[in-house]
Structure formats: structure tokens, C-alpha cells
Amino acid sequence: MENSTPSEEKTLSDTSEVKTADTPETGAEPTVATTEPESGSSGAEQTNNNPTEQLIFGKYKNIEEAEKGYKEAERAVTKAAELEKQLKAYQDKEEQAQQQREIAARELGYSDANEQEVRLSIARHEFKRYCDALETRLSGDNYTKAYNALYAYQQSGNRDYLDMAKGYFPASVISQISGDVALYSERALNEYRDRKALETQQQYKAQLEAFAKDNTEWLAPKERQDAVGLLIQLSGGNVDFATAKAAIDALEAYAVSEYTKKQSENQENQNVQNSLLSPTGGNVSSGDKKWLTKEEYYNLTPEQEKANYDLIAEQILLEKQGKLPKMLT
């Protein structure tokens, strides 16, 4: 909890010295020294100035320089690897610390560590407002009692002490501070909820992208894309994509099984009908009666349909009872 008295800040000033070279005296002419090349200059020096000189690795003049450059590069690689290792260790440590903060926050009844921090910031804001009012609105014995109660609240975090301190302030002050704290709380909590919603949305988006990347072929049919999209919409983005995939696969397997079963039943009925057809392809026969096929029924004239009314009615009844294959029904 923050102390009501702002801490003293120290300002550090950076200083630097600027050194300037001695300037020549006024009127002094600069001296330019020229040196004639000695007649005994070696051919190697002339070769070094040759623009067509062959360099090792395109950079080094001799083996010694190449070895030195290699060692420097090796040291740089080793140092970079060590720094990367240290960074990874730091990140792992921070992740573990964050996990501990999350666990502690949930044990105290918060949804996460961020909500805990927001709630604490609201409490600190309220405490500061009463500390400010303490100096301007109270005096004498009330000031002393309120000061002691606020100090106890600061040290313990027990809100009973804050409620005790409020009792020494005028009602108008309490009302004013309560309104200000309510506005601060609403703004802080709204920002927290918006931030959490955005983080959740980004998290689910990343999960969906990873799922789509690993299941590109599975998601190819538009019907599956629509199904996944509907699940995301209904759940607000909170989808376990692996479970959703398994559920969709199970539904598809059931649909295929039912379709196959229906097709098998239709084929079986067709086979029975075919077995009852006369060799000449005429009507279906059963005993001394010949039943009509659907095509024959549609080709009947009104007079023929009227004449065969009883036969047609009997055939329909027998088909519904399962005693005849379905031809008219």
C-alpha cells in the first residue's frame, strides 16, 4: 500500500567535460611536413597499396589477421549464446513468478493477478483521498484519531481501520470521496475488462490459426468451416478445437452410418421387388393376384383405377403391414 506522503525524489544531473585542442597562435602558419620515399622501400609495401591485391576471405591480408578475426568472431558467437541463455533463464523465471502471482490472486478470490492489481489501485486511490482530506478538513482530536486509523490501515490493509477513520470526517467529505472513488473504480474496471477481452480474443485467434494450420485438409469442406465458425460464435470464442473436431467427426460418422443403413434398406426392398417381378416384366405376383408397380399405377386410366380400386387398397394395406415390398407407398 502506498504511503500518503510522497517520497523525496533526487534529481541527478549528468555532467561531461569537453576538451578542445589547443589552437595555433594568431598569424601562425601551419607547417606541412613532406617526406620523400626512401630508395630502399620494400616491394611488399608497394604490393599492399596495389588495388588488385588478393585478400583472404576477401577481408584479411594475411593468415595472422584471418586467425585473429576468426577468434574474435568465435568469442562474439559464444557471448551471444551466453546472453541468449541468460535471457531464456530470465524469461522462465518471470513466467514462474507470474504463475505464482496468478495462483495467489485466485486464492484471494480474484479472477487473475491483473484484477487484484486493479482492486488494489482502487483501494490506494481511496486511501490517498482520505489522506488529502485529513490535512484540510480535520483538526484537533479528530485529526489525531483519523491519522492513527489511516496509519493502521496502511500497515495492515484491514478495511476496518479505514471505516474507523471515515467516522471522524464530515458526511459531506465522505460523500464526495465516495463519488470520486466510484468513478475511478468504474473506469479502472472497464479498462481491465476491455484489456482482458482483447487478450482473450487474441488468444483464441492464435489457437484458431494454429488449429487451421495443422488441419488445413480437414477444414477444406465449407460445411466444416461453418460448423467451427458457429461453435466460436456460440461460445464467444472459448472453443476447445480438438474436442470440437472430434465432435464434428462423430456427427459426420453417424450421418454416414445412417445414410448407408437407409441405402441398404432401399436396396433390399428393391431386390425383393425385383424377385417378385414376372419373367416378362409384368406385374408383381403373389399367389393368384398380380400387384401393381408404381409406374403401372401412374399409367392407369381413371376407368382402370376405378375397376382395380379394391386391389389397390389391399396392396397398400399389405405394404404398410410389411407383407409386401413397398411399391405404391
Image (cartoon, rainbow, N blue to C red):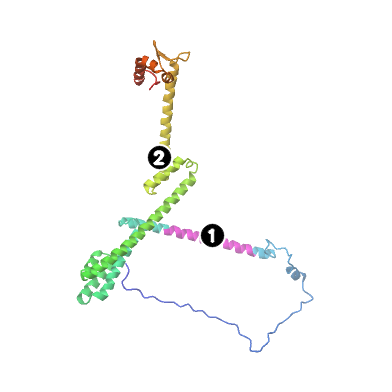
Q: Residue at x 40, y 44 (%)?
A: 230
Residue 126 painted magenta: no
User: Cα distance, mark 1 to mark 2?
Assistant: 46 Å
What is the crowding at mark 1: few (fewer than 14 residues within 10 Å), some, or many (at least 20)?
few
The label on residue 116 is none
Can residue 239 be seen here?
Answer: no
Q: Which residue is mark 2?
A: 247
Residue at far right of view = 39
Tell me where the magenta segment starts and ends, as one range.
Answer: 68-94
Residue 65, position in %: x, y?
66, 65
- Amino acid type at circle 2 is Ala
Q: Main secondary structure of the magenta part?
A: helix
Tell whether 60 sits left or right of 233.
Answer: right
- Rendered view: 92 above or below 51: above
Residue 82 painted magenta: yes
**Which quarter of the picture shows residue 139?**
bottom left
The label on residue 81 is 1
Residue 164, position in %: x, y?
21, 67
